[in-house]
Amino acid sequence: MEAHRAALAAAAAAGPPLEGRTYAPEISWEPEVQAYLEAALGAEQLRRISAALARPPLATCLRVNTLRTTPQELLRRLPDSLTPEDRALVHQRPLYVHPQLPDAIIVPGSGPHEIDYSRTEGREVIIGRKAGEAVMRGAHVFVPGTLAVSAGIMQGDSVAVSVGLELPGSERYPFTRGTVLGSEHAAKQLEANGGAAQDRSKLFIGIGRAELNRTEFFQDRGGIAITMQERVFRTPGCGDILPGEFMLQNLCSLVAAHVLAPTPGSRVLDMCAAPGGKTTALAQLMGNQGEVVAFDRSHAKAAEVRRLAESFGLTCVKAYRMDATKSVLLEPEVLLEPEVQADAAEGSHSQQPGAGQAPAEAAQGAQPNGTAASAADGGSSSSYAAAAAGGSRGRRGGPTQPVSEATLKRLERIAAARRARGLEAPPSAHTPEGKEAVTKGFPPNSFDFVLCDAPCTALGLRPRLVHRQTMRELEQTAIYQRRILASAVQLVRPGGALVFSTCSINPGENEANVRWLLDTYPHMQLVQQVPRLGQPGLTGAIPLPDGTTQQLLTEEEAALVQRFDPSAELDTIGFFIAKFVKRPEGGS
Ligand SMILES: C[S@@+](CC[C@H](N)C(=O)[O-])C[C@H]1O[C@@H](n2cnc3c(N)ncnc32)[C@H](O)[C@@H]1O
C-alpha cells in the first residue's frame, strides 16, 4: 500500500501525460454554500454557472474616453497599437462598437482552444492559482507567480503552463515554491500532504517561452518568467496602450453607469468608488459637467480614484477617503468645507473597518432599521433646511487646502525613492502626507444620483478556480451592504435615483437585499432600467441552513432588476443591478 501511494505521488509529481493535458477544471463550493446556491438556482444551473466561472469572458470591453476621442476614431487607431499577434486576432474577429452602449468597444476573443503540448517535450511550469487566473485574462507569467518547474528548463525552451490549486481548506499548495517536478523531493511533498490525489491534467492553460533558466525562476527578482505563446483562451491584450483614451471595463459595470444615467450638471455620489471605473464612466456620461463625489474607505483607494479621473481629464470628480456607512451628516453644524484634515478625521473615524473586517463588523452592528437610518430618514429637519438654504458656514464639496512647499518637496523625495524601488503609486502630491481629502459626510437628500457598487463576495468574477466562501461570509457581506444602502437611501434626494450593484451571483447580496430595502424603506420604488442586457432576478424564497427562509422578489419586481448570468450567451461576469427612485416620504 505504501509503495502504491509513493508510486502515485511520483507519477503526480512528474505530471500528466502530454496527450491528457486539457483545460476542464471541476470547481467545487463549500458544501453549505453549494446547497444554498442549488436551492436558489437549481443544481443543473449552478453546474453551468460554475463551469462558466472557471473560464474568462471571451469578449473584452473597452470604455472609450469620449471627452478625448470617439469610438469610431479608436476603432481605426487601436489595431496599430497592438502586438502583431493581437493584430492578427482582431483581423480575424474585428472590433466593434456595442449596439446598446455607444461608449463601449468590444474586442472579441476565442477559446477554449485545444493545444498540442508535444513540442514542450514534457517540460512544465506550475504557476499559482491567481497567476493562472491572470494568464487566462491575457497576462504573461511573472516570476513571483511560479510554483514548480521541470528539471533542466533553459531560457528559450517551450514549456507547458499549468495551474496549481491550494490544498482543500488551506492557503498552501501541494508543492513548496521552487520544487523541481519529478524530483524525489516533489514526490515526498505530494505524498506527505495527500497531493497525489490532486489531478492537474485538466488545468493546463497554454504554452509559453521560458525567459529564465530553471535556477533563476525562484530567485528574488521580478519580471516576466514565461511569455505566453499559445493560449487556451485568446483575448487581445489591450492594457497599457493609448493611455487616457480608453480603459478596460467589465461590460456589466458600464451597464450599471448607464442605468444610473446621471445628467450633465447634476450632483452624483459614488459610495464605493475605487479603483474608479464607474466613477469615471459616470463623469463621462455627464460630459464632465456637475460634480461626482467619490468615496472609498482608505486614502490609497481614494487616491486611485483621483488618479484615474485625472488621467482621463475628468475635473468634476472629487475623491474622498470616507466610510460610506458613516457618510450621513446628522448634525447641521458640521456642514463645513470638506477639508484636508487627515489627522483629525482619522481620529473621528477610528472605528472604520479594516480590509476584510467589514462583514464581521456588519454582523454585529447592522440593524435592518439602524439608528443612523431612522435618525436621518427623519432628518429633513428645519436646521437642515436652513443649511441647504445657505445658512451654513461652508460650501459642500469645495477645494482642498493648499500644500506647503516643504511638504511638496518631501513628497517628491518619497515618490522618487518609491520609483527607485520599482513601486507604483507614489504618495499623493495633491494633499499633505500623501493623504486624500476627507469629508465629514453630507446631509440627507444631498445627491441627485447615487451609485452603491457595494463591496461584495465577488462570486461572479471570472475566471475563478476556487470558491472558498462560507455561508457565514455570504450573510455578513449582505448585512454590511445593507449598512451602506441605508446611507444611500438617506443621501439621495426625493425624486433622485439610486443604483445598487454587485459582482456576485449570491441572491443574499442581490435579490434579498432589494427585498430588504423595499420592505424597510417604502418610499423607495424599484424602477425599469435602460439599457437592459441582463436577465430578470430570482423570485420566491430560499431555505437557509439555519431553518429560516430568505425572501426574494415578486415576479413584477424581478422583471425590473438585471441579473447577469455568467453562463448565458452574453458571456459576462456574474453581476446584479437594481435601480430605485426615492419618492417623497409619505408620497406614493
Ligand atoms: C466593488 S468595489 C468598487 C468598484 C468600483 N465601483 C469600480 O467600478 O471601479 C467595492 C469598493 O468598496 C470599498 N468599500 C468597502 N467598504 C466601504 C465603506 N464602508 N465605505 C466606502 N467604501 C467601501 C472597497 O474598498 C472597494 O474599493
Image: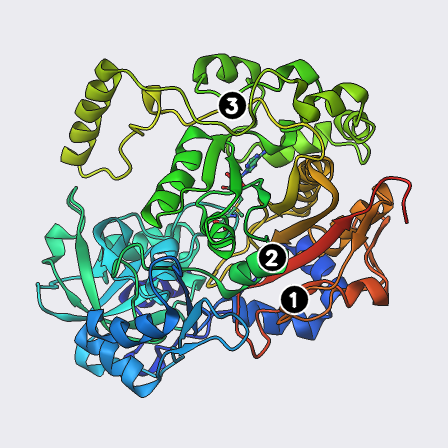
Q: Against 173, is 408 above or below? A: above
Instruction: Give x and y (percent) for residue 203.
Output: 39, 69
Instruction: Give x and y (percent) for residue 318.
Output: 47, 36
Q: Against 191, is 395 above or below? A: above
Asked whether mark 1 and ligand 1 are closer than 8 Å, the reply comes as no
Q: Against 58, is 495 above or below? A: above
Q: Against 117, is 47 above or below? A: above
Asked whether mark 2 and ligand 1 are closer than 8 Å, the reply comes as no
Which of the pair 261/165 is nearer the observer? 261
> Crowdedness of circle 1 by 10 Å Cα count: few (<14), some, many (20+)?
some
Which of the pair 472/367 is nearer the observer? 367
Q: Please name the amino acid that badge 1 sits on.
A: Val
Question: For the residue labelled by badge 3, is the local secondary structure a helix, a strand or a loop?
Answer: loop
- Considering only order in the chain, which callout, 1 or 2, is on the residue closer to the N terminus? 2
Residue farthest to the front, as pictured: 390
Question: For the residue labelled by badge 2, is the local secondary structure a helix, a strand or a loop?
Answer: loop
Q: Which residue is mark 2?
A: 261
User: Residue at 67% across / 18% down in the picture?
Assistant: 391
Residue 159 showing in the rendered view: yes
User: Residue at 77% across / 68% down in the picture?
Assistant: 559
Q: Which residue is mark 1?
A: 530
